[in-house]
Every structure is written in C-alpha cells, then in structure tokens.
Amino acid sequence: MYGVLASWDNLLRAYRQAGKGKRGTAVVAAFEHRLEDNLCRLAQELASRTYRPGPYVSFFIRDPKERRISAAPFRDRVVHHALCNVIEPRFERTFVADSYANRTGMGTHRCLDRCQELARRHRFVLQCDVRQFWANCYLNPFDHFVKRELRCPGYVRYVDDMLLFGDDKQHLWAWKAAVVERLARFRLTIHPGAQPRPVTEGIPFLGFVVFPDRRRLKRRNAIHFGRRFRQLLRDCHAGRVGATRVTAAARGWATHAAHGNTVGLRKAVFRSATRGGTAARSGASRDRGRFQVRLLLDGGRVRTSTAGADPAPPPPVLKGCSP
C-alpha cells in the first residue's frame, strides 16, 4: 500500500485533484512551476517515511456567521488526496448506503432527495446533531448500529447531522435514548433539544427546509447570497474581479437553489441584485469593455454569457520521476 501511495501516477492524480479549480491561486501556481521536482520530493519523503506535514494557516470567514478555517499547505493537500485515493475504496465497502458525506456519487443533493423520500413514507422524524468533533469513518460503526440493532426503517446521515424516521413517537423516544447511550461510547453528545416531531412541520436540513411535498431554501441563504452577489457585481464593474467569476457565482447559487421550490425566490434575488425588470440584465466592464457579463432570468433559471475572458492556462507536460 505504501508503494502505491508514493507512486508517481498517484501523486500526479492527487495534485490534479487538489488543484482543481484553484490553478489561478498563488500557492498552486508556485507548486506547479516546479511540479516534477515537488512531486518527486514528496515521493521520496513518503517512500523513506520522512514526510512531515507543514503548519496550518488559520483565517475567519462569514458564511453567514463567523467561522474559523484552518487550511493545510498545498503540498499537504496533495498528500491528503494521495492517501484518500489509496484507502477510500477500502472504507467505501464498509459504509452504509445512507451516509452521504464525502463520498463519490453522494453529496448534499442526493441526501436531500433521500430525506424527502423518507418524509413521504413516515409520520415522524428525530433529528440529532452531534456536538463534538467527528470523522466519517469514526461514526461508521454507529451507522451500522442504527441500521442493524435499532432496525430504524429510515435513516440518513450527513456529516454531524442525522435523521431517524418512524411512524411511532414512542419508538423514536426509545431510539433517542439508545443513540445517546451509544454515542457516549465515542465520547460524543447530541443537542439536548432533539425530540421527535411530525415531518409535516418541515425538517431543517442542509440549508433547506424539507417537507413531504416541497422544499424551501433557508431565508438566510438567499439574503447572504444576495448581499455577496451585489458586492461581486460592484467589484466587477470596478475591475477588481473578472466577468467569469460573476458568471460562476450566479450559476453556482442558482443551480443549488434549484434543488428546492425556489423559482420565485431566484427571480427575486437576481432582479434585486441587478435592478432589472422581467428579464434582468447587468453589464460590467473592465479594460475598455474587454470583460462583459450578462445575466438573463429565464423562468427562475440563470443564463449567462461572457466576452473577452482570458482562457485557462494549458496543463503542464510532465515526464515523471527518475528511479
């Protein structure tokens, strides 16, 4: 396994995974400038077991509330991906079908679909939020406990948020006691306010409120995006950012919001941000019109076009490490 971890093919694949969508940043560009040397050095350190991770860089973001983010150096992120490439298939075989975080082909939107499917089948839900640090693999035995020992007919977990569905409140109260007892073995606790409630009240989950027959985006999500997008348009008009970034932000949020019943909301957010009419349009220019972005509302969807954007740099040609 260690030989595979330190192999050239695995490290090159890991570099591409770690740098996806980030090749324009300074740290990725610096690593890519001497890519072969950097990957060969990592291969040698891993093979000789002398690799040591570097210090993390911490900063704060508001999304919408303040959170502290600790980022590993880029070369360490390459190693993280290289390690996941090797061990992920082994762990994947042990995961239950209804654990959706950090897994290929899963993700938040499939998790929301499953949540709504179970809300249509069952009358009540018990939502539990783990209140301490955890890891996906760390809670895997707990997932099996819920499915096999409690025999819960409807179970979903995404990161630290888990849902247990049923048709009898007494069963759900009993499951809560069993969940609290089992999580105590992992030195974990759940939010003390967790209690069974009807699915018809709506389930706040992954940025949406899920009902059996509809899905609503959380209000704070739309407010936060509207403020951020208006600032992005101002920055584009002033030449601080390019039109492609505005396009990516508009498409990204609209695509995410489209997983709920949000046609009217999407129209309202973009109309407010661009100060348009039924077909809202916003133009922003830089360098005498070299960049231009256009946002068009079409039934709540966003169609965008850009002109004069710089093309992405071509990928480097690599030869590999000499033995």
Image (cartoon, grey):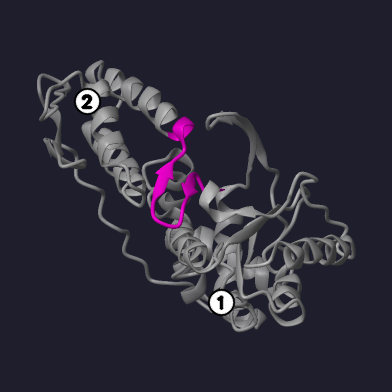
Task: Write down the residue under mark 2.
Answer: 271
Between 158 and 153, the one nearer to me in the picture: 153
**Alpha carbon distance from label 2 to label 1:** 40 Å
Say if residue 158 shows up in the picture. Answer: no
| Label 1 crowd (10 A; few <14 / some 14-19 / many >=20) | few
| Front residue of this view, candidates 309 and 95 | 95
Residue 246 is situated, as x and y percent measured from the top left of the image, at 27, 33
Task: Please say if 90 is above or below 166.
Answer: below
At horizontal 62% and vertical 59% (from top left) the residue drawn is 125
Residue drawn at point x = 68 percent, y = 77 percent: 147
Membership of 205 in magenta stretch: yes
At mark 2, the secondary structure is helix
Amino acid type for the residue under numbered disc 2: Arg
Residue 298, image x and y in percent?
13, 41
Q: Name the residue under label 1.
A: 97
**Count of numbered tags:** 2
In the picture, the quarter occupied by the C terminus is bottom right
List x then y, in percent, for residue 110. Answer: 44, 64
Quarter residue 97 falls in = bottom right
Q: In this view, does 106 lie to the left or right of 190?
A: left
Can you say which quadrant of the picture contains the N terminus?
A: bottom right
Q: Is residue 189 left or right of residue 168?
A: right
Residue at 73%, 64% in the rendered image:
172
Magenta residues span 203-221
